Amino acid sequence: MRTFLLTTAATLALAGCGSKTDNAEPTINELATSQATQDERAGENNADPSVMAAATAETFALNAAMSDMYELTSSKMAVEKSINPAIQKFAQEMVDAHSQTTRALKAATARDNISVAPRPELDAKRKAMLAALEAAPPGPKFDAVYVQQQREAHTATLTLMESFASSNDAPALKAFATETAPKVAAHLAMAKTLG
């Protein structure tokens, strides 16, 4: 009996070693995976629109606009706070690229007669990401947070673009998503080479 109790206690202790604490923030990919699993179980298509397929053109446009807004804000911060020339160069490229995609998104929404706030308020996840960047001291700690966020954000945005590009909704937005997805994939590949 004593051996059984010790074995059970050891098994439970080992099982807890790999688990996250309750107060740890999940990554964008973890949220997407978790939501997708819940959706499969429920048989519904109600996933988080910022990381999963957008249900409507309006939802897609809003999430694409928030993605660009986050990218512009975080990358402008990185140009100022990073001390790594490669990260500063990447950040400036993100400012330039996402300024272009913002203009292209506005044109596509106009062609499809979709109204999206010119500067939408960021969602809680992106606000928290920016707060983490603001709190990080300049230098290697800031760079590590920025690079990790760029990898996560571009992964989520790539999923959003590819999902909408394969839908039959809003032709101008579909063309925008189709044209933007390879650019986002290239940004993700670049982010993976940093730090």
Image (cartoon, rainbow, N blue to C red):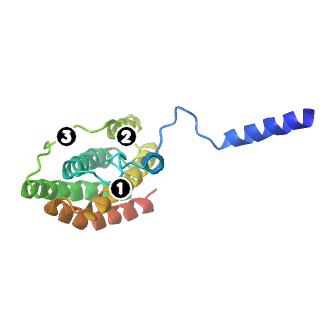
Q: What amino acid type is highlighted by mark number 2?
A: Met
Location of residue 159 by image quarter: bottom left
Callout count: 3
Residue 104 percent across, percent down from the top left: 14, 59
Give the residue pinned by disc 3.
Answer: 120
Location of residue 13 by image quarter: top right
Q: Secondary structure at mark 2?
A: helix
What is the CA distance from the residue labelled 1 to the residue labelled 3? 19 Å
Label ID, residue 91 = none
Give the residue pinned by disc 1.
Answer: 154
Q: Residue furthest front?
A: 43
State left or right for residue 16 relative to residue 82: right
What is the CA distance from the residue labelled 3 to the residue labelled 2? 16 Å
> Of marks 1 and 3, which one's residue comes earlier in the chain?
3
Location of residue 66 by image quarter: top left
How packed mark 1 is, by other alpha carbons closer than 10 Å (few <14, some 14-19, many 20 or more), is many
Q: What amino acid type is highlighted by mark number 1?
A: His
Residue 192 percent across, percent down from the top left: 43, 61
**Proximity of marks 1 and 3: CB atoms separated by less than 8 Å:** no
Residue 157 percent across, percent down from the top left: 32, 55
Foreground residue, 34 or 148? 34
**Proximity of marks 3 and 2: CB atoms separated by less than 8 Å:** no
Q: Secondary structure at mark 1?
A: helix
Q: Is residue 159 above or below residue 115?
A: below
> Of marks 2 and 1, which one's residue comes earlier in the chain?
2
Q: Secondary structure at mark 3?
A: loop
Label ID, residue 129 = 2
> Of marks 3 and 2, which one's residue comes earlier in the chain?
3
Foreground residue, 124 or 73? 124
